[in-house]
């Protein structure tokens, strides 16, 4: 017998990366081998030298296919097995190892917006117009204010079934806007599980014929943005208050540098 392993990786789309995946059929009981892909189709290699390598780093049950099938998060390598320039996980692993004695925890709050299948109109927005002003949609109940609960519920269930450390969900301030949380977990664990949970969200949205956007400001005007908020602590922070103050003061010395590396569109 055999099972399906869905190899998932982060591509080179700019200005913000997307997710890609493809399925490998493996004999029962086998490990996840290194695989490859055409990097010229993912903005990760030129056409004349397009080979890129997929190295599995995390796996979990596939809640969509079920059975013994697996989701496999991979990091991207060059053919010489060094990290690809788009592979930020490798640098994260080095930092995590260097500071492992601090026992860092991360909790990620991922907000997102659901759009109609054309990708232009958020669900809950009337065609060519705008809904009632913000206020009643946050943590709402009722078909007049809550849009997309079926997607959020299906996603949460899928994450639980996959063993992802999902901590909760809620409707957000703008119609069609939702949030889920992953963690607290260690730096590599939370990163791998966040990307798997994002892939699951996109995959489940296919079943409902809607599109997921994690753009930080998907609708201009007086409509809330959608961020990915990071909650962080070390062992020292969890034991006393002063290390929190020290960390905030250190971060405050390089605010612009940090913001520049927190993703595209934060100026919106």
Image: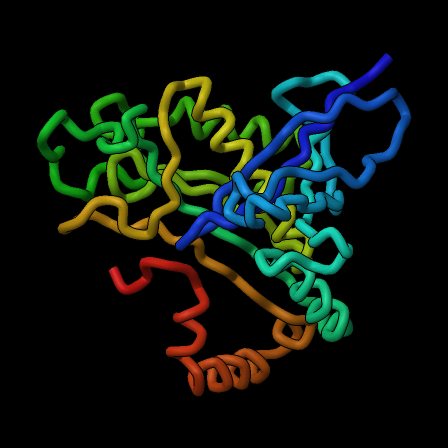
Query: Residue at the top extreme?
Result: 1
Q: Is residue 168 above or below residue 117?
A: below
Q: Nearer the viewer, residue 227 or 245?
A: 227
Res. 236 image quadrant = bottom right
Query: Residue at the front extreme?
Result: 48
Res. 246 image quadrant = bottom right
Query: Relative to residue 68, is residue 245 drawn left or right?
Result: left
Image coordinates for residue 11, horizontal then vertical, percent: 54, 46
Q: Is residue 26 above or below residue 168?
A: above
Q: Residue at x 55, y 49 (%)?
A: 46
Query: Residue at the left extreme?
Result: 129
Could one spot residue 184 in this view of the protein? Answer: yes
Q: Residue at x 48, y 80 (%)?
A: 251
Q: Nearer the viewer, residue 142 or 75?
A: 75
Could one spot residue 69 in this view of the protein? Answer: no
Image coordinates for residue 217, horizontal then vertical, percent: 27, 51
Image coordinates for residue 225, horizontal then vertical, percent: 28, 51
Query: Residue at the right extreme?
Result: 29
Query: Relative to residue 128, is residue 162 drawn left or right?
Result: right
Q: Nearer the viewer, residue 268 or 74?
A: 74
Image coordinates for residue 100, horizontal then vertical, percent: 75, 70
């Amino acid at each position: 017998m055999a099972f399906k392993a869905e190899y998932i990786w982060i591509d080179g789309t700019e200005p913000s990366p997307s997710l890609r995946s493809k399925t490998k059929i493996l004999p029962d009981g086998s490990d996840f081998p290194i695989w490859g892909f055409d990097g010229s189709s993912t903005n990760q290699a030129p056409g004349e030298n397009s080979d890129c390598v997929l190295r599995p780093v995390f796996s979990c049950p596939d809640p969509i296919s079920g059975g013994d099938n697996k989701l496999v998060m991979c990091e991207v390598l060059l053919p010489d097995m060094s990290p690809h320039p788009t592979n930020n996980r490798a640098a994260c692993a080095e930092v995590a190892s260097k500071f492992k004695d601090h026992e860092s925890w991360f909790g990620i709050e991922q907000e997102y917006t659901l759009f109609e299948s054309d990708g232009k109109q958020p669900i809950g927005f009337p065609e060519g117009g705008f809904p009632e002003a913000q206020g009643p949609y946050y943590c709402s109940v009722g078909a007049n204010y809550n849009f997309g609960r079926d997607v959020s519920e299906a996603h949460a269930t899928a994450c639980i079934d996959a063993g992802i450390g999902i901590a909760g969900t809620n409707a957000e301030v703008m119609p069609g806007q939702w949030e889920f949380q992953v963690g607290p977990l260690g730096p590599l664990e939370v990163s791998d599980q966040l990307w798997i949970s994002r892939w699951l969200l996109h995959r489940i949205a296919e079943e409902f014929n809607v599109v997921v956007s994690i753009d930080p400001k998907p609708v201009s005007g007086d409509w809330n943005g959608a961020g990915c908020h990071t909650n962080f602590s070390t062992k020292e922070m969890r034991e006393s208050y002063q290390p929190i103050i020290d960390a905030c003061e250190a971060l405050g010395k390089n605010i612009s540098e940090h913001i520049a590396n927190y993703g595209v569109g934060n100026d919106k």
